[in-house]
Image (cartoon, rainbow, N blue to C red):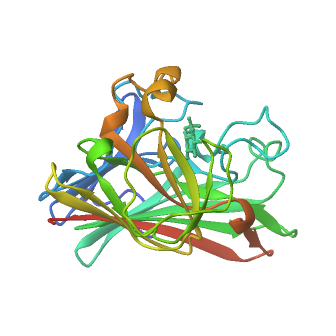
Amino acid sequence: MQNSSGDARHTEQIEAHGLKALRLSASGSEALVYLHGAHLASFRTSEHGELLWTSELAVYAPGKAIRGGVPLCFPWFGPHATQSYLPAHGFARTREFRFEGSEMRGDNVVAELSLSSSEDTLPLFPHSFTARLRLTVGRELSVAFEVENTGVEPLDYELALHTYLGVSDVRHVEVSGLGDAVYDDKVSGERALTQGREPLRFTGETDRVYDSSARVTVLDVARKRRLVIDKTCSATTVVWNPWIEKAKRMADFGDDEWPGMLCIEAANTGARRISLPPESRHTTTTIISAETP
Ligand code: BG6
């Protein structure tokens, strides 16, 4: 991307909560992304307002993951498979990314941030890589996460674009698109369950990993909107709401905030992890928009 300083008409370099950030504006929409974790914290459209959710208790500090928005879970998802002392969901969400530039493409602004392996990451993940987050902001939001294997050995990784959607009340929304999909239930520990054809409704703590590449929609009648979560090159979808007790256990999550959010995460986890041969790349994308039902 040529314009590394960004064009002030669509890209403002700002400081928010003491962290470096970019404000991206196009087609009446606005997004805020921190360089810390390449963490997208806000996406609002002129018609539907804020589509994402961020906790009032989110911590904005080096080394901490921001609770809300779209944390990048990379290069593993959840606890590390063999070394439990390593950070949950990998390290990308707590590393400073580099702003590579932004430009207008049609009616959208496109910004790119990158993170390369370094002396800091190699002890945690012994692979050479460059990861690039490409955000396209316009009437809809596209979050594309590309990983390039810059080493000489194959590189295996997991990834989740851990999207916290804002909802009026999770107890009253309906999620469609996962009909007949097989999932693992991380709350009960049961594996290979099958989702029925009915829309998914929420009555308790939910933490599921679906084997699904499908588009998901979230009907939110009270907000008069349907959120649409499309994706490409993502074979798993994570659905998460902590509900009452788990919310209370998280220091950066208000006790009463859980009804207002729902995570629908485009992911490649577990058996669907990505195996990248040397000198190759893979991109996973989630595309988020809202419509009037
Ligand atoms: C979800 C996981 O994606 O992230 C949950 O499926 C986890 O198991 C949640 O609790 C939040 O993780 P963290 O590390 O941000 O508290």
Q: Quadrant of ligand 1?
A: top right
Q: Is residue 251 above or below residue 25?
A: above
Residue in view at x 53 percent, y 35 percent: 65
Q: Is residue 272 above or below residue 51?
A: below
Give 89 or 258, whichever is nearer the viewer: 258
Residue in view at x 84 percent, y 69 percent: 154
Q: Is residue 137 above or below residue 233?
A: above
In the displayed structure, does residue 192 sit left or right of residue 154?
A: left
Q: Is residue 127 above or below residue 80?
A: below
Q: Quadrant of the C terminus?
A: bottom left
Residue 141 at x, y percent in the picture: 33, 64
Can residue 228 be seen here? The reply is yes
In the displayed structure, does residue 293 sit left or right of residue 113?
A: left
How many marks on residues?
0
Can residue 96 be seen here? The reply is no
Residue 165 at x, y percent in the picture: 35, 49
In the displayed structure, does residue 273 sit left or right of residue 109?
A: right
Residue 109 at x, y percent in the picture: 30, 66
Residue in view at x 23 percent, y 62 percent: 226
Residue in view at x 76 percent, y 70 percent: 275
Give 97 or 46, whichever is nearer the viewer: 46
Residue 27 at x, y percent in the picture: 17, 66
Q: Quadrant of the N terminus?
A: bottom left
